[in-house]
Image (cartoon, rainbow, N blue to C red):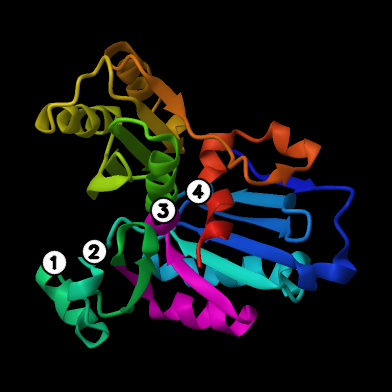
Amino acid sequence: MQNLSIIDDTFDPTITSTYHLSLQFSPRNFCFAIMDTIRMRYIAFKNFWFETELAPEQQAERLRGLLQNEGYLAKNYKSVNFMIDSPGSLLIPAPLFQPDEAETYYLHAGGVDSQSMILNHKIPAIDAFLLFQVRMDIHELIKGYLSEFKIFHQAVPQIEDAVVESKNKAIPAALYAEVHSGFTDLYLVNAGSLMFYNSFTIRNDQDLTYYILYLYDQFGLPQEETPLFLSGFIELYPAANETLMKFIKKFGRLEFNKSYSYGSAFNTLIQHQFANLINLARCE
C-alpha cells in the first residue's frame, strides 16, 4: 500500500464552495476525495497509508497532524462527509428506534467504550438506523477543523449502495465483502433487501476465507451462481483472494460509481480500494 495524490487540472481553489469533500479515517490510512458538484466530477484525491496500525490513543493526534498540514482541507466546501472505519456497529429498524435509548441498545449488544460516544445514522434504503461508536477525542477534533460536516460509519455507504444497486439491476442474491485491516464487513443482499450484515475479526487469510464460505453454506447460496463482490484492501490477504477465486465462480471487485465522472488521473487508482469513499458523496 502506498501514499497517493491526484489533482485534476480543473481544480480551482477559489470555488471550493461548489465542491463536496469526502474523508475516510481508519487505524491504517486516511484519504479524501473532492468532487465538483456542478459537473458531478471527482477532481482530487489523496491517500496516506500508515506503516503500522494506530492504537486507539494514537489516532486523534495523527489525525490532527493530517488535518493541520493539508491545505485542501482548510477550504470552505459546499458539503463535507467524514467516514470512520470501525468493526463495531448495530442496526435497529426505524419503527423500533428511540434516539434516547441509543446507549442502551449498544449496551445489550456488547458494551460501550468509556472513551467513545454513540452516534446514529438512518439508512433510507433499508429503513433502519445504524448505531456506531466514535472516540470523543476524534469527534471533538473533527469539529474543530471541519465545519458543517456529517459523520458516517463505513457500513452506511456500503449498505446503501449494495441495496440500491440490487433494486436497480434486479440481480439475484449477492454477497459483498468490504475488507479492512483486521476485520471484514459482510453483506448479503437479495432482490433489493438486506438479508444479512455483520463484521468479523480476521487475523489472517484463512479467517477471511472461512467467514465468506461459511455464509455461502449457512444461507444455502450456490457457489456457482451467487456472485461475490470484494472491495477495500483485499490485497492485505492475497492467499484468501486466490482461494476464493477457486471456489466461487462469479467473482468481482467493486468499481467507482458510474453516476460520476473522474479526472483522467483517477485511472491510476485501484478502484475497489476506494469505492466506498467515492460512494460516500451519495449519503445524506
First-in-chain label (1 vs 2)? 2
Residue at label 4? Answer: 276
Q: Amino acid at mark 2?
A: Leu
Q: Residue at x 41, y 33 (%)?
A: 230
Left or right: 21, with 126 as reference point: right
Q: Are marks 1 and 2 in contact (CB under 8 Å)?
A: yes
Say if 232 sits above or below 82 in the image: above
Front-most of 98 and 201?
98
Residue at label 1? Answer: 109
Residue at label 2? Answer: 90
Left or right: 181, with 47 as reference point: left
Q: Could you tell me how far apart the alpha carbons at marks 1 and 2 are, in whole angstroms?
A: 8 Å
Q: Which residues are magenta?
A: 130-157
Left or right: 4, with 228 as reference point: right
Q: Amino acid at mark 3?
A: Glu
Q: Position of residue 97 (x, y in %)?
A: 22, 76
Residue lying at the far top of the rendered structure: 246
Q: Could you tell me how far apart the alpha carbons at marks 3 and 2 are, in whole angstroms?
A: 15 Å
Residue at label 3? Answer: 160
Q: Position of residue 169 (x, y in %)?
A: 43, 35
First-in-chain label (1 vs 4)? 1
Q: Quadrant of the N terminus?
A: top right
Asked which quadrant contains residue 122, the reply is bottom left
Q: Which mark is residue 26?
A: none
